Image: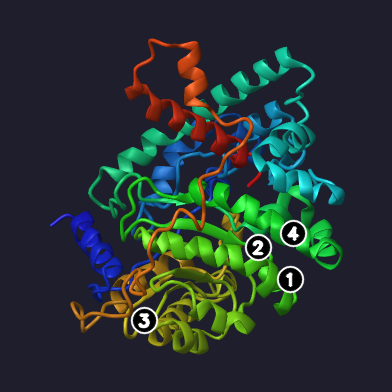
């Protein structure tokens, strides 16, 4: 039997609430880690990611990971330098050492909430994007056209640069072959979207005191864009919607419940209604919000950075899937035996009863953030010690066991003055067949997504 066949069954069982043969894991290397392993500087890496290919394969074969332990390049990972430099990005800049950084920036003024609420898409196109990307200047159409063309070509080239080595490993029969195409995506909570590149952390924190009602209204206006951006084309239990969560632990509980939570809860419940599972990246300590997290749709994946594993298992483990929590500091500073012992201790707490995905408490950025020998020992211990004696039994609560129903009146499809209008197109092109309508509207939504992608 291929290792892939065994892994495919582990994940199929797990996401259908059947205790699998062993605990699944979610451990990956960043491109910076591979570059350090290959003795290639980050600046060289950003020039041509294909130079990582051979070493990416070499280090992957040393690791006992469930999935191919690196990803092809995307606009979000590792924030490819050429793409953002061509666009003239203020929000993603390469440091002198070659690391892409996200400085504190604000693309929106505090007096502009009403404009954002009136037509979010138009406001982003007309105001925010030109502020955050200096080469997307609406007053210089030729440079704008050139910038978009060059940036898209650079991104396509970078996206293809590691595809061959990734596919070589993916097709080897040694790794989990993943959820069906179209079942995974990513998005952001409406309030987090506003707090990140629109107002910045400091601006949003100040606005909570002075513009709370305006933020709440803006979250409702942003919600349709965030929801449909993340809605998978083909929801499936093994697929997921990645949602990095930023602001809750920096907010007062009252503000969290009044401002951040309502639109996000509506979003995750409507995803559950179509059988789509959210993977929440809960960085920082969410101890004070455990009761709120308990109310999220059953089967939500909660990647936790901090907290007492025993308390998390007790409060959330019967309803949700827990991921993370294994201390990366042990992998970096501990001995090999200490790492092995910690893996066993960790699994003894979180594995019983199912519903746990093994992962580090925070992802390492560089290879020097871990001890490679310990990392290898960690994965090997998981492979052997993480086995279940009661495989085949059911666990937890199934996705959408609450019975949520999709209701488009709760989150209407977004509409802007810049939205594509089929009737106008038909008027200008009377010979266009009606069968073309869905395709053109899909292209328009792809355009909307590409604009929002610049701000997440």
Which residue in the structure is indicated by mark 1?
250
Q: Residue at x 66, y 36 (%)?
A: 43
Q: Secondary structure at mark 2?
A: loop
Spatial CA span between label 3 and label 4: 40 Å
Which residue in the structure is indicated by mark 2?
246
Spatial CA span between label 3 and label 1: 30 Å
The x and y percentages for residue 72 are 45, 40
Horizontal side of 246 relative to 203 (left or right) equals left
Spatial CA span between label 4 and label 2: 16 Å
Label 4–label 2 contact, CB within 8 A: no
Which residue in the structure is indicated by mark 3?
351
The residue nearer to you, when weighing 419 against 281, is 419
The residue nearer to you, when weighing 327 against 450, is 450
The label nearer to you, 3 versus 4, is 4
Spatial CA span between label 2 and label 1: 8 Å
Q: How is the image coloured?
A: rainbow
The x and y percentages for residue 7 are 25, 61
The x and y percentages for residue 116 are 73, 45
The x and y percentages for residue 209 are 85, 68
The residue nearer to you, when weighing 330 against 135, is 135
The label nearer to you, 4 versus 2, is 4
Q: Secondary structure at mark 4?
A: helix
């Amino acid at each position: 039997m291929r290792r892939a066949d065994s892994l495919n069954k582990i994940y199929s069982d797990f996401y259908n609430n059947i205790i699998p043969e062993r605990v699944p894991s979610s451990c990956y290397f960043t491109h910076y880690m591979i570059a350090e392993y290959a003795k290639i500087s980050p600046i060289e890496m950003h020039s041509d990611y294909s130079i990582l290919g051979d070493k990416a394969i070499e280090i992957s074969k040393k690791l006992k990971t469930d999935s191919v332990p690196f990803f092809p390049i995307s606009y979000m990972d590792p924030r490819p330098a050429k793409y953002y430099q061509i666009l003239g990005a203020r929000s993603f800049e390469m440091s002198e050492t070659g690391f892409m950084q996200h400085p504190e920036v604000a693309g929106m003024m505090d007096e502009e909430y009403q404009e954002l609420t009136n037509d979010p898409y138009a406001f982003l196109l007309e105001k925010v994007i030109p502020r955050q990307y200096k080469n997307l200047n609406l007053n210089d159409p030729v440079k704008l056209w050139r910038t978009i063309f060059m940036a898209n070509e650079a991104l396509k080239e970078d996206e293809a640069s590691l595809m061959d080595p990734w596919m070589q490993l993916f097709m080897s029969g040694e790794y989990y072959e993943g959820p069906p195409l179209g079942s995974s995506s990513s998005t952001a909570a409406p309030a987090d979207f506003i707090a990140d590149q629109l107002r910045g952390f400091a601006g949003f924190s100040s606005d909570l005191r002075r513009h709370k009602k305006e933020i709440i209204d803006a979250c409702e206006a942003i919600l349709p864009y965030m929801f449909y951006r993340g809605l998978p084309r083909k929801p499936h239990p093994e697929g997921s919607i990645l949602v990095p969560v930023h602001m809750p632990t920096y907010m007062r509980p009252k503000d969290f419940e009044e401002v951040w939570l309502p639109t996000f809860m509506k979003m995750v419940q409507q995803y559950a209604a179509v059988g789509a599972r959210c993977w929440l990246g809960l960085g920082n300590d969410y101890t004070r919000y455990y009761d709120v997290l308990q109310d999220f749709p059953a089967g939500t994946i909660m990647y936790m950075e901090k907290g007492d594993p025993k308390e998390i298992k007790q409060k959330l483990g019967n309803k949700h899937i827990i991921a993370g929590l294994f201390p990366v500091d042990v992998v970096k500073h501990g001995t090999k035996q200490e790492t092995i012992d910690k893996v066993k201790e960790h699994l003894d707490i979180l594995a019983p009863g199912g519903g746990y995905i093994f992962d580090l408490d925070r992802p390492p950025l560089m290879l020097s953030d871990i001890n490679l020998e310990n990392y290898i020992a960690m994965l090997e211990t998981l492979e052997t010690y993480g086995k279940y004696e009661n495989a085949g039994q059911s666990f937890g609560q199934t996705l959408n066991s609450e019975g949520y129903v999709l209701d488009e009146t709760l989150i209407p499809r977004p509409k802007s003055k810049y939205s594509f209008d089929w009737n106008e197109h038909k008027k200008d092109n009377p010979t266009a067949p009606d069968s073309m309508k869905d395709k053109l509207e899909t292209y328009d939504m792809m355009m909307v997504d590409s604009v929002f992608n610049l701000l997440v």
